[in-house]
Image: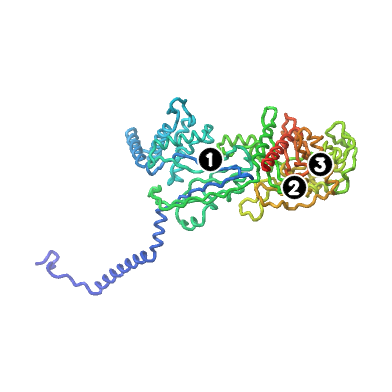
Amino acid sequence: MKDVDGQNPSAPSDRISPWRLNAIFFFFCAGFVYVAVGLSYRQLVQNEDLTVKSDNQGQRVVILPPSRGKIFDRNGYVLVDNRVRWSIKADLLALQPEFRKEYLALLMKEKDRFPDRRPDYDQLQQTARLNVLNAWLTKIWFVIDSTNQKAAKGTAKVKSTPDLHPEERMVHPDALRKHLSERRALLFPLILDLAFPNSGHAVTSEEGNRSVARFIEQFPVQGPITLEADMVRSYPNGKLASHVLGYVRDTDILKGQLDDELVEKFANLQKIGNVGKKGADGIEATYNEVLSGYSGWELWTKTSSGYNKDRLDAKPPKQGADVALSLDTKIQKSAEEALAKIVDSQGKPLPAAAVMLDVNTGEILALASQPSFDPNEMADRVTQAYFDQVNAEGGWLNRSTQGLYAPGSTFKLITATAGMRANKIDWDDILDCGPSYMVGGRAFPEHDPVGYGQVDLEKMLAVSCNVWNYQVGLRTGPENLAKEARRFGLDAPLLQKPAEHNNHSTTELPNPATRMVVPDRAYKQRVAGEPWTDGDTANTSIGQGYLLTTPLHMACLIASVARGETRTTPSIIHDPGRDGRHAGAEPIGLNAQQLNALREGMLRCVEEGTAKSVRIPGLPYAAKTGTSEYFKKGEKAHLAWIIGYAPADNPVVAFCVLVEGQLDTSTWGGKTAGPVARDMILAWQTAADEKDK
């Protein structure tokens, strides 16, 4: 029987040739061997690498910022501390079921309202999250807000939370969106700080603790809303020494805060960090590496949607080291309180600076600048309103180290020293000093309309005679005046760190002035394109003209004179082993009679001269006052100066006070700056007496 094609269907097919079967068998075996070898290679050779890659994709490291070290004064008094910050946060992973439920409800409503329009799914998800979080926030506020609860029986209501604007009690959409984008794995902060600092509605620590207690009572520990504690910066004395201490600001974790273990062990893992803090000004900035410490970490598995799932391992952060400053809190406080009493016609404190040094070591006992700021306002996040307020007042400038001013009559110490060293005048020479002195056809005035008659060195310093200095300055010449000022370091940068300090900053405080001016002929030719005149020399001799220096420089000058040397190296860091040697210091270069006359003149300045109003009975001290001119808004105003040391017969401390007079104020060295110096000396004496007991 044959089919339609004429073939017999029952006949056997052609036999497959052996070489074809062998080829098929060969390819099958080769494939099997390839798969087996590949699997073996991956299991035996690549196993570790593949495991690492798998872990890298499924794990992440959460970096924990450390607490910063404390800052103390020379006596161990805490100037900067850390406080516990209680915050309420949401676990977004644990809230996913609630988000999903709310999202589906919103989606159904959207489709019912607009059946022909495609929903904006991303916006609905965002709205769902906000609705859920705001609902939780409403519950939280109800629990912790004392306005909804009565105090103990028989007492009035206690207000423990501020009256915030309704918008401040809700989650900000941008904040949530940024968190999901950058820090999805971390808990989302609903209330950042239960003490509400910087809000304009801050509460006391006791009231904040009541809010914490109410939350713990009402919310389960394992719930999606948790109470978290961390450490934030605290400045217990408010504005005290704010320009020295500085403040901190938010930052991502710094490389210098990660120990070698974290860098090597988790080199290929994703790292996400809580916001840390870094120094932004003052000691907080210049000693940031010392204060910062080392970060801790937590190793987590992560979900496909980017949330943390299970914690596998952890290491706590290590707190930063402490820093001891040379400041004496009591002297610092007396300086700032005294400065605050110097006000303009509207009762607003005048811009001013005050410095006190240890004569022998150069350690700074007080360094004040007015106006100032409260670093607590920056401990969390500074508001734009507060920043603008401080900026408008000029409060960011550290006038003690950054302000540049004409030193006025305090410079007469340099003029006298230069004249005696150049043999142009001696300690007992007497000059006739009338109401003015003619220089280049111009009458340079005395500050007393009658003049002072016969004047020697001691009397000049006591009454601050201008005419004596005009004559001596012209005899000495501008080059010798400039040379002497440079010998005392008036043009040298201060607060330089020792070379062995391993820190990013080269100075003990940020940005101390570097553009001091000690003028000479070459300087005027360079900046003004004009030749030097005798009038320039006369102005320089009384601390006016082109001269510019800082209050800290003038404090170092008078400390050097007190020791009979030319240089003082100031430091804001306390070192009990400091040996009192000062870089670049050399003998002052005056004989005993000349140096004694210089010191006696400053003693007479206090006992009978321009600083007589601030003498201290029973505690003789030496001083030189000064009043110089500067231009404010195109009109002349005055700077009030006083420098000196105490006690007069055995100098221990040196000081400098500067006050910036305004157009509507009358400022004079002894009358305006003198009371601040007196109060600092009294505070030092009180502290010294307490130590002797």
Please tell me which residue lies in front, 109 or 535. Answer: 535
The residue furthest left is: 1
Judge from the rendering whether residue 626 lies leftward or rightward of residue 115; answer left or right: right
Of badges 3 and 2, the one in the foreground is 3
Q: Earlier in the sequence, mark 1 or mark 2?
A: 1
Label of residue 491 in the image: 2
Please tell me which residue lies in front, 358 or 435. Answer: 358
> At which x and y percent is residue 132?
38, 37
Residue at the image position 53 percent from the left and 49 percent from the top: 319
Q: Name the residue under label 1.
A: 380
The kind of residue on which mark 2 rests is: Asp
Label of residue 412 in the image: 3
Name the image quarter holding the C terminus.
top right
Mark 3 secondary-structure assignment: helix
Please tell me which residue lies in front, 182 or 90. Answer: 90
Q: Looking at the rendering, which quadrant does residue 686 occupy?
A: top right
Q: Do the residues labelled 1 and 3 touch (CB within 8 Å)?
A: no
Q: Can residue 278 be seen in this view?
A: yes
Mark 2 secondary-structure assignment: loop
Q: Is residue 669 visible?
A: no
Residue at the image position 48 percent from the left and 32 percent from the top: 161
Q: Are marks 1 and 2 in contact (CB under 8 Å)?
A: no
**Label 2 Cα crowd, 10 Å radius (few <14 / some 14-19 / many 20+):** many
Label of residue 690 in the image: none
The residue furthest front is: 693
> At which x and y percent is residue 659?
72, 36
